[in-house]
Amino acid sequence: MKEKEKIDWLKSHCYSEFASMYGKVFDDLTETQPIFCVCGKLATGLHERTCKKFNNKVEREVLRRLEHLLPYYLTRKKLRYGSKRNHESGTQDAVLPEESRK
Ligand SMILES: [Zn+2]
């Protein structure tokens, strides 16, 4: 689902890069599956254009090639800082008033 987020980001922020890379990857992947599609059906050009599985595969490959365009917050493996920061500020809030009371 994080992958989907990144793909959506690329589509909305770098559409021309995404679209041209999509075309390239589509051709590359079409060549690597000469007879059968990833879904198991006969890989005709028409089928590949409409096949959801194949298009998901293309999108994932596009994402890999365009990952450098993503903003830092989307490239982090885990979005961990949100909860960590909450925890830290929570500790601070708890400690500071206590010390000022003494
Ligand atoms: Zn297919």
Image (cartoon, grey):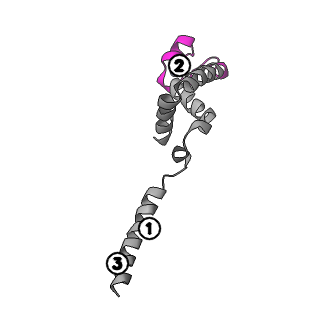
Residue depicted at x 44% and y 56%: 82
Q: Which residues are the magenta region?
A: 30-53
Q: How far is disc 1 from disc 2 in space, using C-alphas? A: 53 Å
Above or below, comparing residue 59 to residue 86 in the picture? above
Q: How far is disc 1 from disc 3 in space, using C-alphas? A: 15 Å
Quarter of the image with the N terminus in it: top left
Question: Disc 1 marks which residue?
Answer: 88
Question: Disc 3 marks which residue?
Answer: 97
Above or below, comparing residue 37 to residue 13 in the picture? above
Q: What numbered label is drawn on residue 41?
A: 2
Q: Secondary structure at mark 2?
A: loop
User: What kind of residue is marked 2?
Assistant: Lys
Q: Residues within 10 Å of mark 3 (few under 14, many from 20)?
A: few
Examine the image and state in which quarter residue 63 appears. top right
Examine the image and state in which quarter residue 61 appears. top right
35 is within the stretch colored magenta: yes
